[in-house]
Amino acid sequence: MIYDVAIIGSGIAGLSAALRAKELGKDVVVVTKKYPTQAQSSMAQGGINAALSEEDSVEAHIADTLRSAAGLSDEGVVRYVCESAPEAIAWLDYLGTPFSRKGASIAQRPLGGASAARACYAQDYTGLKILHTLYDNCLKAGVKFMSEKFLLNIIIEDNIAKGVTLLNIRTSQVEQLLSKAVVLASGGYAKIYGAFSTNGYGSYGEGLAAAMRAGAVLSDLEFVQFHPTALAKSSILISEAARGLGAKIVDGKGERFCDELATRDELARAIWAKIEEGQEVYLDMRGLGEELLMRELPQERKLARIYEGVDPLQEPVPIRSAAHYSMGGIDVDIDGKTSIKGLFACGECANAKLHGANRLGGNSLLETVVLGRRTGESATMCHNEVEEKTYERTRIDTDFVRAVFGLPNQIDFMERQEFLHKVLYNNAGIVREELAMKGVLSLIRQHQRELAFMGIRDKSPIYNTELVRFIEYGNILELAEAMVVAALQRNESRGAHYRKDHPEPKEHFKAHSHVWKEDGVLCADFKEV
Amino acid sequence: MRLRIRRYHPHFEPPSIDMEYEISGGGTLLEALEEIKQKRDRTLSFSSMCRSGVCGSCAVRVNGKEELACTYKPKDGDYIEPLSVVGVLRDLIGDFNSSLATLKKAHAYPVQMHSGMSEEDERQIERQSDCILCVSCYSSCPVYETNPSFLGPFALSRAYRYVADSREENKKAHIDAVLQNGIWDCTLCGNCTAVCPQGIDPKNDIVLLQSWAAKFGHLNPNLGNFGSFGLEF
Ligand SMILES: Cc1cc2nc3c(=O)[nH]c(=O)nc-3n(C[C@H](O)[C@H](O)[C@H](O)COP(=O)(O)OP(=O)(O)OC[C@H]3O[C@@H](n4cnc5c(N)ncnc54)[C@H](O)[C@@H]3O)c2cc1C
Ligand code: SF4
Ligand code: SF4
Ligand code: FES
């Protein structure tokens, strides 16, 4: 069977693309390594931006987005997304999304860096409710789902995408999925910081790594947003909406030391500096009161109690800053086209240059919907000839998975992985510097050389989660290398990328960093905005 | 602290055994499972994603009751088993395919919507739309033992969510979809309500669906027999 459109990823981007392609009468299949609604999109709490109210305007939304992007966004994309936002909310409403309301209108709240209360929300379940509503609509529309299949590689012939190879997690068999267009909607890579990330397990950017192996260009990888307020022990997110409602950031003495509504990068650095001084930092939500907290942020109290053992109504909650969102991604144009024919990308795995050097809260869900739909549409216009045969890529990947079972397992990859996360966070995280990053790069390359001595202890072909984690780890190494290379070549500070040795922005770096692979060798360069 | 875990692998003989593990304790059950996997036994298989109770991938049974591993704090001697669903794949990982298939059968999706609703209207469906599809309620439901085609608690709650949605114009299509193997087959035992981590009350939603069905002239087929006690007057 050859599908019209194969979409990898069942988050809000993937499902928005799927619904659009299905509306246009195409055979659509959505692949996910879990079950459809178990995507990270379910975790988004704060909201989705759209200028809807009298006090707000599309122009203000555009201006805020451009300001935050620090010169690295594409104004045409920003304008298109912000202008499409009210319509996107109306579409979601029409599909049945139960947004919180104020009177007859959709309620909106302020998030950091926004000049108006612009984020539409559904309590603190915004992502969950949008995702499940889209899923319900996909069931209605007859979108086909393939669950528990792990993307390994993109099948390329004559520089055209013909489908993908998948690891069937239930059986450890490699399968090929052929389609006239492939859409990657596989999410971001902020989890390469492991325990120092707010993201769920699995956001390791496998889609990006697969695209890079297939020859696509990745851009602006060095821009990773660190969220200022994550729980200190677990890195679980406390939504920015808490600060919007009046929560304060305080030090061990209970004193404020920053402006809570400053941009995320400024706050993350202020908190990092305090913690580097050996102090502890807290989020004080006591002023919100029980009624407001339970109505607007019901999850937060539960999570603070479970993971920190602290009731936010009684005590300030210990926090740290953690990797949260990846601005960089597979380089695409406004239609989601990558540098490879037939290969598209949307959502957090893509870089359509909406967020530039820094994302505004509430703009990424908006991107997943608006550009997800647009990418879904442009994928339907792709008419590649795909032959029904076993492709070379499928043979190679089958051999690869077989080989992993035979690896000697002399070095424990899980130990290595934990160490790598820590080193990345401390040296290529919130605050960066050349020498330290060069150290990180050589560590990554050493880990890559050691892969052949690692391997898996679990030799069962049935639902082998160690196998999945090992392949994820290989991807993490590949992507971390590309990210650190990009961070090293940007000798300036801009948006979320902060270099202690180059603390100011420089005009000639007002350019997108590109990385790609040629014959397996990593190449890097800049491209003008 | 010790945990007892029911292990399952279809190729082993016997396929199912209980194993005990020492854990450091203090964290969540998911953190304990992670500790076992990383430090003691790489073959232990379980599922997780968000760590924060929203993705619905980590539900298991603890001492017979459904819990999310990422929000449950284990106690010494706890017995951990997979959900009771059709087909365990391995250890704590269940096959969700047949339970998820109930959603489509129950028409748990919008049929004909218009946009716009009030604050009050939204409150009517707030709880039901908190569902994370963790499948805990399905696992707890006793009806499956006698009727594997039963639509089940989450599908019915999610169908009710669209019936109660003020934007939905075609309520009848929803009711028609939940009559067979649906609202009348539930025994109203309340197990589902007791285990839902999101505080959803599928039992009550089923009762509400029954009264909607009555509005459309459908009577409880079981009551017919009851009403006359089988006697002819
Ligand atoms: C805690 C948290 C809170 C957030 N809050 C907000 C907010 O309030 N507002 C906002 O705008 N943004 C927010 N964000 C960001 C936003 O949620 C994400 O950017 C967005 O959901 C990404 O959606 P996506 O569809 O691109 O990817 P995801 O939702 O991450 O989905 C990725 C999909 O790809 C699949 N996949 C990945 N790898 C593979 C593979 N190898 N094989 C097969 N399938 C694969 C996954 O299973 C999944 O289905 C938040 C993020 C986090 C972590
Ligand atoms: S109340 Fe009904 S649906 Fe819920 S567990 Fe009991 S029989 Fe099943
Ligand atoms: S109704 Fe509750 S228990 Fe059932 S799937 Fe939804 S969240 Fe889980
Ligand atoms: S890991 Fe997502 S609900 Fe537990």
Image (cartoon, coloured by chain):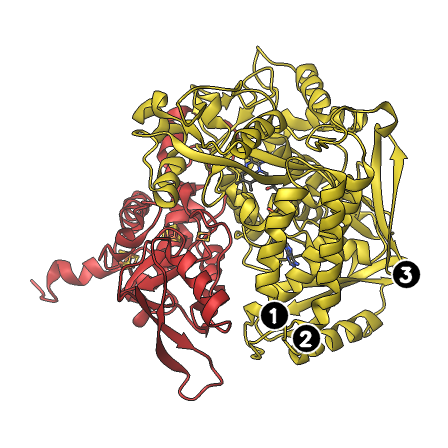
A437 horizontally vs B49: left or right: right
Q: Chain of mark 2?
A: A
Q: Residue furthest bottom?
A: B13
A309 horizontally vs B44: left or right: left
Residue A336 can be seen in this image: no
Q: Earlier in the sequence, mark 2 or mark 1?
A: 2
Residue that mark 1 sits on: A467
Q: Are marks 3 and 2 on the same chain?
A: yes
Residue type (three-letter) at the residue carrying disc 2: Val
Please tell me whether mark 1 sits on a helix, a strand or a loop. helix
Where the C terminus of chain B falls, by quadrant? bottom left
Q: Answer few, some or many: residues within 10 Å of disc 2's Cα (few below 14, many 20 plus, some between 14 and 19).
A: some
Disc 3 residue: CB within 8 Å of ligand 1: no
Q: Which mark is residue A66?
A: none
Kindly report the distance in space between the C-alpha atoms of the residues bearing marks 2 and 1. Answer: 8 Å
Kindly report the distance in space between the C-alpha atoms of the residues bearing marks 1 and 3. Answer: 26 Å
Residue that mark 2 sits on: A404
Q: Which chain is yellow?
A: A
Q: Which chain is red?
A: B
Residue type (three-letter) at the residue carrying disc 1: Leu
Q: Earlier in the sequence, mark 3 or mark 2?
A: 2
Residue that mark 3 sits on: A519
The reply to whether dot 2 and dot 1 touch (C-beta < 8 Å) is: yes
Measuring from the top left, give residue B182's x and y in whole percent: 35, 58
Q: Answer few, some or many: residues within 10 Å of disc 1's Cα (few below 14, many 20 plus, some between 14 and 19).
A: many
